[in-house]
Amino acid sequence: MQMKNALTIVAAVAAAMFAQASFAQASAPASRAEVKADTKAAEKAGNLPAAGEGATDGKPSKATSTKTRAERKAQTKADVKAGNIPAAGDAATDAKPMKSTSTKTRAERKAQTKADAKAGKLPAAGEGAK
């Protein structure tokens, strides 16, 4: 009787191991050749996005402009003339150029700077005013 129970247990363990092995093979990752074949098929069907475009539905955009190039150029020219387009660069700031109200001539400023450098009063480069 004990032998019969032992055989039943061994058979159950063997069946479980066989089932586990077959499931493991079914869920194995695709081989390199399979992945390459899938990619080629998707490319041929036009389902791959352009490089760097990220995830898309694979279909090209149908967005088209309602204006011609000449119309867009004319509109831009008019906007520039009206001052609606900011200058290139830091367009987000409304910085106005500072007006210089110096009472000294350039020669006087140069002489003052030379005297300050000789006296050691100038800050190191990049340190700003103290």
Image: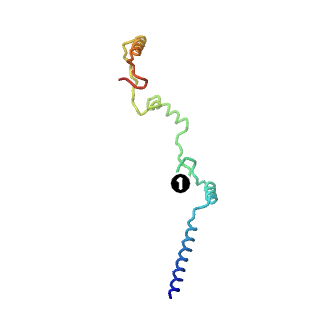
- Residue to which mark 1 is pinned: 57
- Residue at 52% from the left image edge and 83% from the top image edge: 6
Q: Residues within 10 Å of mark 1 (few under 14, many from 20)?
A: few
Q: Position of residue 3 (x, y in %)?
A: 53, 86
Q: Position of residue 15 (x, y in %)?
A: 55, 77
- Taking 32 as reference, is 6 above or below it? below
Q: Position of residue 123 (x, y in %)?
A: 39, 22
For this orientation, the residue located farthest to the front is 2
For this orientation, the residue located farthest to the bottom is 1
> In the figure, is residue 117 to the left or right of 60?
left
The quadrant in which the C terminus is found is top left
- Taking 111 as reference, is 8 above or below it? below
Q: Say what amino acid the circle numbered 1 marks.
A: Asp
The residue nearer to you, when weighing 75 against 27, is: 27
The residue nearer to you, when weighing 129 against 118, is: 118
Q: Position of residue 55 (x, y in %)?
A: 52, 52
